[in-house]
Image (cartoon, rainbow, N blue to C red):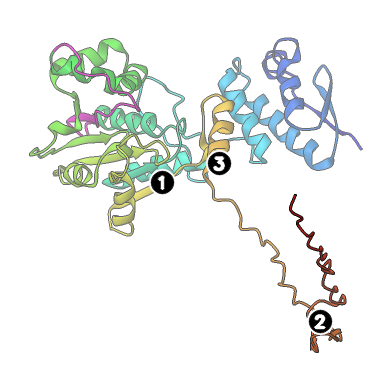
Amino acid sequence: MPLRHTFTPLDNIRLAHLCGPMDEHLRAIEAVRPVTIHRRQGAFRLEGRQRDAEAVLELLQALYERASKPIAPEQLQLMLDDLRRGQAAPRAATPEGDIVLHTRRADLSGRTPHQVQYLRQILSHDLTLGVGPAGTGKTFLAVACAVDALERNHVQRIILTRPAVEAGERLGFLPGDLTQKVDPYLRPLYDALYDLMGFDRVTKAFEKGLLEIAPLAFMRGRTLNHAFIILDEAQNTTPEQMKMFLTRIGFGAKAVVTGDMSQIDLPRGTPSGLVDAVRVLQGVKGVASTRFTSADVVRHPLVARIVEAYDAQDRPAPAVDIPVDKPVRPSPRKSVAKPVDKAVGKAVDSPVAAAAPAPVAPRRRTRATPITSG
């Protein structure tokens, strides 16, 4: 039985934003769930299984509420991912309300339950560990919380650090001063700052000393008071480096450690400081940890499928019981009467009668021929 729904009061602008150009949003929804969508003005008819039709209708209602302006492609894709996984349509709706961060992006909020949990842990704990695959927003959300803390005067500066480890390549010695040498390794942090603060404000913040980006190797011996510290790519630290970083936290400081345990670029046999820290700091008061999964990937939907494929490959194969053939016992041999050689008077081993010895030809006697004298 088809499911029918009519949006009232009818708003043609919202309806156009909901359906997209040439109803491409409706076609994208049909590609996710086996439901056919028919539309006549504001009246919709959904044909398919009852559960699928109800899930699609819930998504249409959520999109209609947000359709006061054009729906961004990434927002639609994230909601389609939720529909594919059977989650509720509004991603960031929480009983306690959304977390509002003071950044240049007014719509910045957690898009998945783990991201919302991650933000709340950063705001309520002095040390937070964010562990998960690429594309889950670990670094970006941490930088957003740091910018928010700086804007609210909760901290006096932001310090971003990262181990200078190449991803499987040896680039050799880079030219320039210290800043120019480490810039290639810290470029993702710059990108997040430019997106959240703008290029001009980031430049002025560096000049005033409000922002500092440094490699992990230069953190030893420092005490970081009233600072928001972020250690990115922590899976490439050694346990000694991780302990050194964690003991830099001073009064009024907050630290966030992010990393992906599946992308360790350390030499073979070198333990990861992130893996060690997650194990050692488990249950320590004041330390929170969030584990992201492929369901939290907010990049291209292909990234989530790539992460799932690699996770499935790394997962050990289930044990298979292989039947073992039981050894076959030889059947007892029947006793066979052995023939007796009459000539010898003994039994022979072969069941076939002993062959008679080959006859010996008698010697031929020759007569001596008398020799006559001539």
Pointer 2: what residue? 333
**Mark 3 secondary-structure assignment:** helix
Compared across the picture, whether 58 is left or right of 70 comes to right
Question: For this rendering, which residue is in front, 350 or 165?
Answer: 350
**Mark 1 secondary-structure assignment:** strand
Callout 2 amino acid:
Arg
Q: Are marks 3 and 2 in contact (CB under 8 Å)?
A: no
State the extent of the magenta-drawn residues as a range: 153-176
Q: Is residue 303 magenta?
A: no
Q: Main secondary structure of the magenta part?
A: loop
Compared across the picture, whether 201 is left or right of 22 comes to left
Residue at mark 3 to residue at mark 1: CA–CA distance = 23 Å
Pointer 3: what residue? 313
Pointer 1: what residue? 290
Q: Is residue 159 magenta?
A: yes
Residue at mark 3 to residue at mark 2: CA–CA distance = 54 Å
Relative vertical location of residue 20 with respect to residue 320 in this rendering, above or below:
above
